[in-house]
Amino acid sequence: MPSNSRPPDARPAKTAMVECNCLALRQAARHVTQFYDQFLASCGLRTTQFSVLARLKRAGPMTINALARELVMDRTTLGRNILPLERAGLVAIVAGRSDRRSKELHLTEAGAARLRAGVKRWAEAQARFETAFGIRRSSDGERARRRGQRRRLISRRRISPSSRLPRLRDPPSLRAGETSIRTMPGGRTPMSIDAAGVAAGPLCAARRPRIAALALLVAALLAACDEKKAAQAPPPPAPAVGVASAAIKGVAQSYNFVGRIKAINTVQLRARVEGFLDKVLFREGDDVHTGQLLYQIEKDQLQAQVDQAKANVAAAQATELNAQLQYNRSLELVKNQNVPQATVDQNRANLDGAKATVLQTQAALTQALVNLSYTDIKSPIDGRIGLTAYTEGNLVNAASGVLATIVSQDPIYVVFPVSQRQLEDIREARRQENGSLTKIEILVRVPSGKDYQHPGVWNYTDPQVDQTTDTLTMRATLPNPERQLTDGEFVTVIVKERKEQPRLVVPQAALQVDQAGYYVLVVGADNKVEQRRVATGATQDTDIVVESGVKEGDKVIVDGVQKVRPGQTVQIAGQVAAVPVATPALRDGG
């Protein structure tokens, strides 16, 4: 046979090789899809949602516009993917640091944990894929050899420092982004095709036109296989979705505000006389009662002043008695004309002066007794006392400032601002058909997120609007027997109706949002998906009130929303049971 003649089995071998590569590519594509779907299912995230978490982890807090530019997608699609992340607590939307009107996305601790778990699962899925297809990653020795070769070429000025060496593809092994098969008929080396559609391996050692021809041939074979399978494959089954029925439930409409806890009474203890502290009769942080002795200042000097004032009173009273006797005697003598009338008048003036002196000394005695009582500093209210500013042995006086502060504990105030518009909304929501107003209660949620167990009573509304903030100050009184609330603490104030009213609700998982607003996907009687725009109201647990758009009994999709579109036929895989309101009293508003 001439040397330039082609072996009779060369064409069948090459065709078999291309067909094997076609099957290998299809098998790899199926495994890639399977591993990727398993990875996303284990994370509970979509592709875009995983990209959002990864971008926030890498770049930190970002605005929604900047994130949309980074991920190259419109705000509507990005918002549709961010809403479930926010509900799940994986991201938080807060006001911008530079511009308070803009909103920034922050990655929460739960989001960072979900991202770490996703990266770990992706590594596991990648390892399974490499094991299934015999992928061989570059060893440390191969990487060191390539680095040495690159340094030698740079030193000889064969390549620039910014250039890279082409990856060696012989012997062919399946690397990241490639598909190959190890054995072929006739012992030939298989052809590998990377993700960009470029052929590699010993079969590609020829000139580039031959490489392009082989790549086009493989692409044509793949397209022919796709058309043949598409013609033979049955239509895909309808996607399965989970639904929940819209139901009437008892919902108490509520409004949330930011409030501050404020003590009803706050007393600052001060010294009113000068002296050294003899005793500090309390323990810092303890509860004290009205009249309880707290401080004692030395009494010796003030006691001496009291004794001196008592002596002055006694002397003044003796002088008064003598003046009274002189006056009485002169009255008897003037009747017989034994003394002149001037003597009587003088004795009367002396008596009046003596009485005035008695009153003056008695007032001085009272002042001395009051000063002596100031040496005992007692609690004027019931409450909790704070730190003492002075200890025993220190000199205190009126200029010493506050010795300690007592704050009342039970009951306690909660003060919160309400805008004029919010106040009108609350009044409109409370107004019933008969013109009366529904009763409300004040609830408090502490910073830990737990609800305070004692409801409050609304007892004050500021008669004037604060012109700087356009708000009214509201105040409620709360019992505080366990001393759980502290003066100055920030809390969430919930103004809530006392009685629940029947309202139509759907699960929050069914609510979707786009540029036009909120909507839900409803499964009709013929199992076709319908898109309905809704007007939402208050939320309660995992449900949200729907004012319009759906009716009681409508089946809204809560699971598998991303798999369907309006007008598509679906099959119901499961239905979440709803608990409707069945009590007639509640339906009647009683």
Image: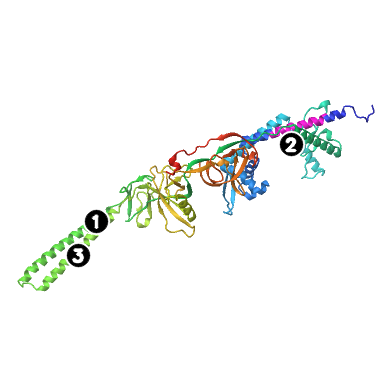
The one nearer the camera, 394 or 201, is 201
Q: What is the spatial separation of the Cα atoms under label 1 and label 2, in whole angstroms?
A: 101 Å
Residue under numbered circle 2: 177
Looking at the rendered structure, the number of numbered marks drawn on it comes to 3
Sequence order check, earlier mark of 1 and 2 = 2
The x, y position of residue 408, in whole percent, is 37, 48
The one nearer the camera, 275 or 578, is 578
Q: Are marks 1 and 2 in contact (CB under 8 Å)?
A: no
- Residue 306's tag is 1
Q: What is the spatial separation of the Cα atoms under label 3 and label 2, in whole angstroms?
A: 113 Å
Which element is circle 3 on?
Answer: helix
Residue under numbered circle 3: 356
Left/right of residue 324 with respect to residue 489 in the rendered view: left
- The single residue placed furthest to the front in the displayed view is 525
The x, y position of residue 546, in whole percent, is 53, 45
Q: Which residues are magenta?
A: 16-33
In the displayed structure, 18 sits above or below 427; it is above
Q: Amino acid at mark 3?
A: Ala
Camera-near label (1 vs 3) is 3
